[in-house]
Image (cartoon, coloured by chain):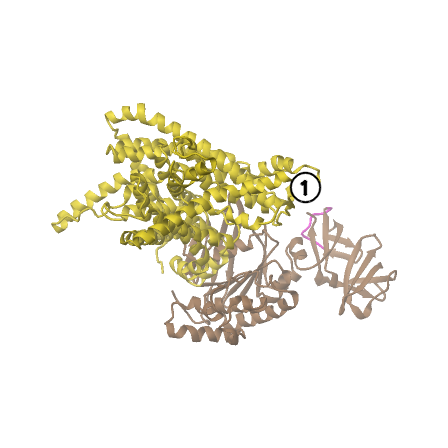
Amino acid sequence: MTNSSPNLTHTLRLNRLHHRFDGRPVIKGISLELGAGEVLCLVGPSGCGKTTLLRLLAGLERVQQGEITLDGQLMASEAYHQPPEERDIGLVFQDFALFPHMTLLDNVAFGLARLPKAERKPLALSMLERVGLADRAESYPHQLSGGQQQRVALARALAPRPRLLLLDEPFSNLDVRLRQRMRLDTLQLLKVSGIASILVTHDPDDAMFMADQIALLRDGELVQLGTPEQLYHQPKCPFAAEFFGDINRLHAEVKQGKVETAFGCIPAPELEEGSRALVLIRPEAIRLTENTGAPARVVESRSLGARALVNLTLESGEPLEAQLASDKLPAVGDEVKLQLDWRGVFVFKNA
Amino acid sequence: MTTDRLPLIPTGSRFGYRLFGDLRSGWWFGSLAVMLLVLLPVLGLLGYASQGSGDLWSHLRTYVLPQALKDTLLLLLGVGAMVITIGTGSAWLVTAHSFPGRRFLSWALLLPLAVPTYIVAFAYLDLLHPVGPIQTWLRDILGYTSPREFRLPDIRSMGGCILLLGLVLYPYVYLPARALFMMQASGLLEASRTLGASPARTFFRIALPLARPAIAVGASLALMEAINDIGAAEFLGVRTLTVSIYSTWINRGSLAGAAQIALFMLVLVVSLIALERWARRHQRFAASARQTRILAPRPIQSAKGWLLVLLAWLPVLLGFVLPTSYLLVEAIKRLEFAGVEAVILRETFNTLSLAAVATLVTSFLAFVLAYSLRLAHNSRGALLMVRTASLGYAIPGTVLAIGLLAPLGWLDTGLADLSQQLLGASSGLLISGTSFALIYAYCARFLAIGSGGLEAGLSKIPLSLDDAARSLGAGANRRAGLIHLPLSRAPLAAAMLLIFVDCMKELPATLLLRPLNFETLATHLYAEAARGTYESGAIAALLIVLAGLVPILLLNRYGSRQVSA
């Protein structure tokens, strides 16, 4: 097995993967690529196939159709299956899966069996140091907090310098505050070690924060692949737009290649004349203006600290939710004028 | 670390993968071999029985089989009725009612489990002898002077045999029934009470139907023990199938004839298992009533209730206290008279070393089975292998022994021929002349205790630990040694203890398969009872009972654990 230096370019390639459980398709023709040192987030609602994809990559499930290559080497296909223990792929589990009967040091040293005995413990110790737990080396997993266990799991997976690191919902067992901190720490560790990583999560915030690339999955299909910015600002479908944040839905008719809304006409050349269109507006794309704009009435207004949530009704009676800066909070019953930041407005065919 | 690539191993095909999951070759062949080892005696039996026994068969068919079948069925019916009545009744009494000494009684009711059937028969044969202590004492009270004037009905009868077997086998029903009443059914039982049902109505309408699957499991285990028994039936003059097999082989020297009877017994056992499965078919509704709260007992108030409490002490007294005290008294007498005899020491050593070796081998094979099942993610094929291998517990010792004699005999001659050709000297009887066959039989019979216990233990280890270890480069063997063995130490130790004690107690297979002039405590006792002598037999019996007490003491400490065999 090659134990190559981190600056060498690894590429993981998934080629038209299909997978079924008891005849039910769970992965339907997914192709993906991942460059060296990149962090890819697999996101999607539960049951979308993201965990199955991760298990296929790790070798815990066998590939039924399609193939997976790493650095040009075939790792798994219909006819070939490299067992997980030979793949050099690190795994971090949702439940951390630390060996309960081993000290932290032994846990981290577990994957270093290929090294000479004398080198294992020092290396494991230096890994623990990197996650700030060197002083707990002789403790057992049950003596640690959730965040500490997560760090040990990460150190253990990174210690053998895997060619690829897979993280399965690594933050879902942590409380909100700890989560934010662990995201940052984990991202730094991944970037410093330069190991390409795939992170599975159902939480869009995890993905937005961590990912170089996001792969959005639904029902076993790749809905959209792109940078966090692309997924947020150029969603390819209503599902993608809605997945990464609350959104307002307006309906309108397509006339002469445009849709008419209270905010004015939006060009929609690719939509069929006379069909119904779906207009999605991000709450933070709505602005209050003094003079010109769509008239609306404030129904409810609530501060969330730095930001405020304002519920509005358009003249047509359609409800809208806006996210505004707290300092310009309108009062309930106020008549206001609205304008849109067009980067947060998306028009789709009404499904 | 394993380096075998998939195309070389049985899981290479899609079909194989579906059946056996990711089971790696070594472990797959291992568990296949274990399954074949258990099946070998059954195949040997079929092979031998099909050869026919010539004229003997017509004799067996006319004079031996009908009697043996009748006696066996009668015995099973009687013992079945007894264990269900005593087991269920006492379990209900100690779980649904409170009275002084309830906790102690609840534990003491397990004690007869430590007394093997042949030992209880051995003890009562002397205790109830017309000039023995009990009858003499009764005559003294009643004013008779000679056994000719007054004697109890002879214990050497079908009735006596049913009574004695029932007295030591009822804990097999008591234990699961108690667990069910106490834990699973508490909510439903309390609901019944709040709906105004009398205690009797609650018992018959709610508790009993709920407990039926548990009772069926327990009763079938008890009946397997009854079928398996050789000592008690023979001492008490009941000619069961087991006794007939033994005497056909020992007295007539006809292995084929013995094999033919053994086949009948196998059919009987299979129908017993089928009956158990049938009675358990609605187990799911009982499982859905699972509760973790313990049933709150109600105090006993009526005189009738107190009578029942006294009655519930009876099986403890008759099944454990009386025979064990008798053995204790006789053992002390013998020790005062002859000191610690060399023969007892040698037999104790034989028994312990045999049991120790068998326990090690059995638990190793059990680990292979249980771990393979885990490697295969409980796939259908692996599950089938493990379940088949576990069927050995149901094969009576005599059947197992007869089934083993033929294949091992062939193996022996084969080995002797081979060594004659290769080395120019015969190796002698490597297998029949040593304890090999005996250890084989113990393994086949007690494998289920080990694999069942280990399976339960392994299932508590999260699967993510396996996956984590795999992703860190640990192959199946390394995972077994570093993760699964250390994490299943407690269930492994418990299983080993149960196997060890069962090996110590085992009589029928030991009688048939031991090497010449090799005696264990159990065979010593059998020989003395058969000769009608009472020398150091009581010491041997006492030692076996004491060994049997160890798991019960631990059982009590860990609460109500299911008996596994």
Visual hue assigned to chain A = brown
Visual hue assigned to chain B = yellow
Report whether B282 appears left or right of B254. Answer: right
Q: Which residues are magenta?
A: A267-274
Residue A79 appears anywhere in the view: no
Residue placed at 75% from the left, 50% from the top?
A251
Is B107 situated above or below A87?
above
Q: Work out which residue is located at the far left of the displayed protein and give it.
A: B424
Report whether A168 appears left or right of A263. Answer: left
Residue placed at 66% from the left, 62% from the top?
A233
Report whether B265 appears left or right of B316. Answer: left
Report whether B54 appears left or right of B399. Answer: left
Instruction: Give the percent coordinates (x, y) of residue B490.
Output: 46, 57
Residue placed at 83% from the left, 52% from the top?
A317
Instruction: Give the percent coordinates (x, y) of residue B76.
Output: 43, 33
Instruction: Give the percent coordinates (x, y) of residue A68.
Output: 45, 56
Residue linked to disc 1: B191
Q: Quadrant of residue A347?
A: bottom right
- Amino acid beneath label 1: Ala
Q: Main secondary structure of the magenta part?
A: loop
Is A250 situated above or below A116?
above
Instruction: Give the percent coordinates (x, y) of residue B424.
Output: 11, 49
* Residue A269 highlighted magenta (yes or no): yes
Is B529 situated above or below A66?
above
Q: Quadrant of residue B56?
A: top left
Residue A304 appears anywhere in the view: yes
Q: Chain of mark 1?
A: B
Frontmost residue, A9 versus B319: B319
Dot 1, how many residues are within 10 Å of its Cα: few (below 14), some (14-19), or many (20+)? few
Frontmost residue, B417 versus B245: B245
